[in-house]
Image (cartoon, rainbow, N blue to C red):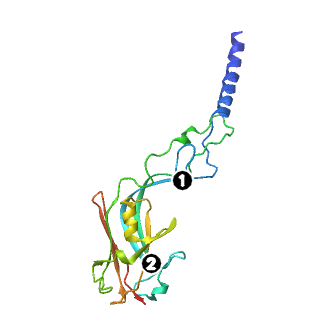
């Protein structure tokens, strides 16, 4: 009798696991909205450790403006500000409940990385774009030209607001790793354009980067 019970026990245990597999929902991602029943989002946490700034003729085609190039204002795409970042954690695909067959459904998939999307601990204290040559009567060499720049969003999505409005509305939060900026007018006093970006973070870090000089005509 005892030996018979011993033979039956593994089958009972297997049947129990099978039942648990049917009853517990898995957290497999099958598409759908960003926020899932498991309360996970598409996270991308990073720490900024550098800055790069380039002038582009065409963002979508990746056409850079090279040093000493000459182009018209209509040909000019704008400035790409790229934060050099180090990733701390990411979850590309949100978990989503799905009643699928499994002996042991993926419970760990419902464990989301905590915290907001974007930079984990850094915020903007100061963000300035300077012209290194005389631009117009109101913007001489080393003056801030934030008021002449349109925030176009980033490579993940488009926007349309002034740079000043974007900085004010974001309240210093950094949720993306880059920034697309467009000039609202061509230089009037000196066609040679060279811009410098200064970015100061709440951590005390200050990063600076410059575009290569080029000539921008009306």
Q: Mark 2 points at which residue?
A: 78
Is 82 in front, or is 34?
A: 34
Is 139 on the left-hand or right-hand side of 181?
A: left
Q: Residue at x 48, y 79 (%)?
A: 77
Is 212 in front, or is 156?
A: 156
Is 178 in front, or is 145?
A: 145
Question: Dots 1 and 2: beta carbons under 8 Å?
Answer: no
Picture quadrant of residue 151: bottom left
Which circle marks residue 169 in the picture?
Answer: none
| Residue 122: x %, y % from top left | 35, 56
Q: Is residue 78 above or below residue 215?
A: above
Q: Residue at x 65, y 32 (%)?
A: 23
| Residue 205: x %, y % from top left | 29, 61
Q: Is residue 155 visible?
A: no
- Quadrant the N terminus occupies: top right
Q: Is mark 2 on a helix, strand or loop?
A: strand
Of marks 1 and 2, the one in the foreground? 2
Q: Mark 1 points at which residue?
A: 92
Query: Crowding near pointer 2: few (<14 within 10 Å), some, many (20+)?
Result: many
Query: Crowding near pointer 1: few (<14 within 10 Å), some, many (20+)?
Result: few
| Residue 190: x %, y % from top left | 33, 90
Picture quadrant of residue 199: bottom left
Is 167 on the left-hand or right-hand side of 113?
A: left
The answer for how far apart the CA atoms under marks 1 and 2 are is 29 Å
Q: Which residue is drawn at 57% across and 47% down?
A: 36
Q: Is residue 170 visible?
A: yes
Is 121 on the left-hand or right-hand side of 13?
A: left
Q: Which residue is drawn at 29% across and 83% down?
A: 138
Q: How many marks?
A: 2
First reached walking from the N terminus: tag 1 or tag 2: 2
Q: In this view, does 202 lie above or below 110?
A: below
């Amino acid at each position: 009798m005892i030996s018979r019970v011993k033979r039956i026990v593994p089958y009972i245990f297997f049947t129990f696991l099978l039942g648990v597999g049917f009853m517990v929902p898995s957290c497999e991602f099958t598409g759908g909205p960003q926020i899932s029943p498991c309360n996970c989002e598409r996270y991308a946490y990073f720490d900024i450790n550098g800055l790069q700034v380039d002038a582009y003729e065409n963002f979508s085609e990746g056409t850079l403006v090279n040093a000493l190039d000459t182009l018209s204002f209509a040909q000019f795409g704008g400035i790409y500000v790229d934060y050099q970042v180090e990733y701390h954690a990411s979850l590309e695909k949100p978990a989503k409940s799905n009643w699928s067959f499994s002996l042991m459904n993926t419970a760990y998939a419902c464990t989301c990385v905590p915290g907001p999307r974007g930079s984990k601990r850094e915020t903007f204290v100061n963000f300035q774009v300077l012209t290194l040559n005389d631009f117009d009567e109101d913007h001489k060499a080393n003056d801030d030209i934030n008021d002449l720049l349109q925030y176009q969003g980033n490579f993940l999505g488009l926007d349309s607001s002034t740079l000043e409005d974007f900085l004010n509305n974001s309240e210093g939060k950094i949720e993306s790793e880059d920034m697309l900026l467009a000039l609202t007018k061509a230089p009037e006093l000196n066609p040679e354009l060279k811009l410098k970006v200064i970015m100061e973070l709440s951590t005390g870090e200050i990063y600076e980067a410059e575009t290569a000089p080029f000539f921008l005509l009306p």
